[in-house]
Image: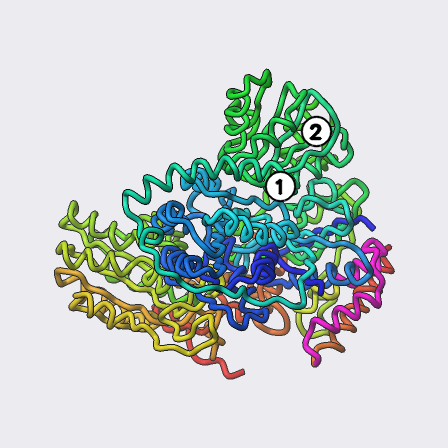
Amino acid sequence: MKEYVMGNGAIALGALAAGVNLVAGYPGTPSSEIIETVSKYPHEGIHLEWSVNEKAALEVAVAAAYSGARALVTMKQMGLNVASDPLMSAAYVGVKGGLVIVSADDPGPISSQTEQDTRRYADFCRIPVFDPASPEEAFKMIQDAFDYSEKYCTPVLFRPTTRVCHAYASIDVPDDYSPKKYEGFVRDPLKWVIFPRLSHRNHGLIEERNINIGKDFSEYKFNSVTGGKSDKAVIASGVSYAYARECLKDHEEIKLIRIATAFPCPEAFLLKALDGVSEVLCIEELSPYIEEQVLKTAGRHHLDIRVSGKLDGKVPHNGETSVELISQILTGFLGISCGSGQMEAEDVPALPMRPPVLCAGCPHRASFYAVKKAMKGRKAIFCGDIGCYTLGNAMPLDMVDTCLCMGAGITMAQGFDHLHRDETCFAFVGDSTFFASGITGVVNAVYNEADMILCVLDNSTTAMTGHQPHPGTGRNMMGNIVDKVDIAKVLNGIGVRKVITVDPLDLDRSVEAVRECAAESGVKAIIFKSPCIAITKPEKKCLIDQEKCIKCKKCIREIGCPALITTGSKGNTPGCAGSAPMEAMDGTADSPDGKRPDEVVVIDRNLCTGCNLCAQICPVHAIGGEDRE
Amino acid sequence: MNKDIMICGVGGQGTVLASKIIAASAMEEGNTVHSAETIGMAQRGGSVTSHVRIGDRAYSPLIPSGSADLILAFEPAEAVRNLKYLKKGGMAVVNRIPTKPVTESLHPSGYNGTEMIEYLQGKCDCIFVDADEVCASFGSTKFFNIIILGIAAGSGRLGIDKDTILAQIAKRVPARFADINRRAFLKGYEIGAGAA
């Protein structure tokens, strides 16, 4: 059957078609939909899980692969940093069943902290990597990845990028697939127990094997050459290859070399492809990995060839490539016009910025505000973390002083505390991040006598990446209802003596909890517990009583909720028939000073979730009441 | 058929459903289709785009600049933001009603959409439509995504048969809304046919 799916869906379906037995991962854009897709298609007999983090996911999968089963692990590129410990060792030990680790890179970066390149990890760990250019390829290539993994008894990396993960295409899905029949774990300490002697022996074997994989990859169907014999050639990989093809579709005579397996380098293929070429341009995203392979190959074989790309400044190091960028570079390199024309952008009016903000009614806003209010006038450092709540850095909240990596806020708050004894050090961490890598940090704080306040922003989901369940939610990817891991009990169990659980939407109690914790020494924790508004249905809406409102705009200035808007009073009643933001735009021109005499503050009923935070801030109690319209 | 269609707007306006219906309809008529959508940090209120590429020679998942045959803009500033994708001779269907940024009350920008419409008028072939007005009889601007699809189909620029699209709409919306969506599409179709 034909299925129109996202690249991530194609990867999932390819793994199912390959007979995968176990799938594990941790959510992270752009990789999250792989596991979600597996869960939506028949997967009887397959173990499926969101693991607590990428390291756990990979270790679970390694055991499956030792048992002869096929295992898929999914994560975003930075997740591979977390999983790098088992990855490196598993690369030395090897596997029996196919083990494919999908690490989705995010050039741009669009929703990541780094622009790291998974292909470097492949080289670092000395394991093969596959680099699809489209969802169709990803579907086939992931199946090849399993075959290569078993053929060479090695973990294999699979590296799609955002534009492949999130592109849609039609995939021919087999109607019938079933998990692989596997032998089971066979004890063999000389094989499965990593010791210096094993590492020494396997290191040598791995390098010999990689020469063979390079030869094998030289025959691999996705390493291809199109176009004719020419002095100048273009090498591209991943989605840059798709872009280059787009640019060159009216110039099919140009030699276009595509490398789909960056490591081990398919050297024989490359040598053949470069035969007769005197100038080559390498186009790739992230690092100049292929460019370096071409340079090495040229050096080793004394090729008289000029190699261009990132290293000589022809291709930018940072950011995504695009048809437009490649078109410009190719036009310069080849001296012919490539790509399509572009409309001239002249005198473009100033476009409104639409930055990401915490949603209207987001409980994180209330948690940040409570801490801010409680600590007003006192010295404090606020360590943030990875999740929606990183957006707490925006004005007017301005409550995130640092953000480094998953779980770092907790340990960084301790570092700050040791050097700033007169400041109160806070760490904000989401529930999923707490389970992923927060707990050990808290143990560290207890053990090393840090003074800090841990704020767990518990919204009962992994919100940022699309609401995946986690150990605190009470359900898992096998569709089972399971015991919830209780964050308060965990904290008590690891030695946090003071743990207060509070509803952040109760402002007074929340402020009181923060003050109470700030008055004590040691490690204290506040669990701000309120569900994500994107997965709950609001029961009510707030309204502003225009007769009482004194237009002080304190609500807007203090919390910056998107549902609080100002508008002309020209008969606009937000929320009546249709969309309030649209109605609110009545075309009334602002006066030069930006103030309008008839301006009123209203609540956009389409956005309001009735969280009531603004009502608790209003100095004249003009906001409130359940609207029983 | 080779055709590139860009759909743009603000998160929450229903652009994704519109792109899914176009993609499914084009496939139903035997075309190869690729598409790509904004995913990730773009929440409600952020700029969103969908790229729908119909035809066998679309390699890039995103529409190259200057290649779109049609832009369906759910918001005037988003039409301007994405105008670079339109090819010479292409057409844009644009909602006149602006959506101010969610940060507007905190950081007023004075944006009200009029300068965008003036700019567009001088740049390309446009059909402007007032979403509030055309949606009034349907009781909610939520139907605008189906109406704008109708306009695109009615204008003849979409190149997909009316009944193919109607069948896909029926397939993708809840049964109790099937009739109102059908009427919304046909109303748009009429506007599009009249403007063409």
Which of the chains bears the disc numbered 1? A
Tell me which amino acid carries mark 2.
Answer: Lys
SS category of the residue bearing label 2: strand
Labelled disc at residue A439: none
The location of residue A99, given as percent across then percent down, is 47, 54
Q: Is B21 part of what is drawn in magenta?
A: no
The location of residue A52, given as percent across then percent down, is 37, 62
SS category of the residue bearing label 1: loop
Which of the chains bears the disc numbered 2? A
Name the quadrant of the N terminus of chain A: bottom right
Give the quadrant of residue A450: bottom left
Q: Earlier in the sequence, mark 1 or mark 2?
A: 1
Q: Residue at x 45, y 36 (%)?
A: A208
The location of residue A101, given as percent across then percent down, is 47, 52
Q: Is A500 displayed left or right of A201 in the figure? A: left
Tell me which amino acid carries mark 1.
Answer: Tyr
The residue stretch that appears in magenta? B149-175
- State the residue position of label 1: A220
Q: Main secondary structure of the magenta part?
A: helix
Neighbor class of circle 2 (other Cα within 10 Å; few <14, some 14-19, many 20+) is: many
Q: Nearer the viewer, residue A106 or A423?
A: A106
Name the quadrant of the C terminus of chain A: bottom right
- State the residue position of label 2: A255
Q: Is B189 displayed left or right of A299 in the figure? A: right
Coloring scheme used: rainbow
Q: Is A600 displayed left or right of B72 in the figure? A: left
Neighbor class of circle 1 (other Cα within 10 Å; few <14, some 14-19, many 20+) is: some
Q: Is residue A598 visible?
A: no
Q: Nearer the viewer, residue A269 or B180?
A: A269
Where is B88 relative to A103, above or below?
above
Q: Is residue B156 visible?
A: yes
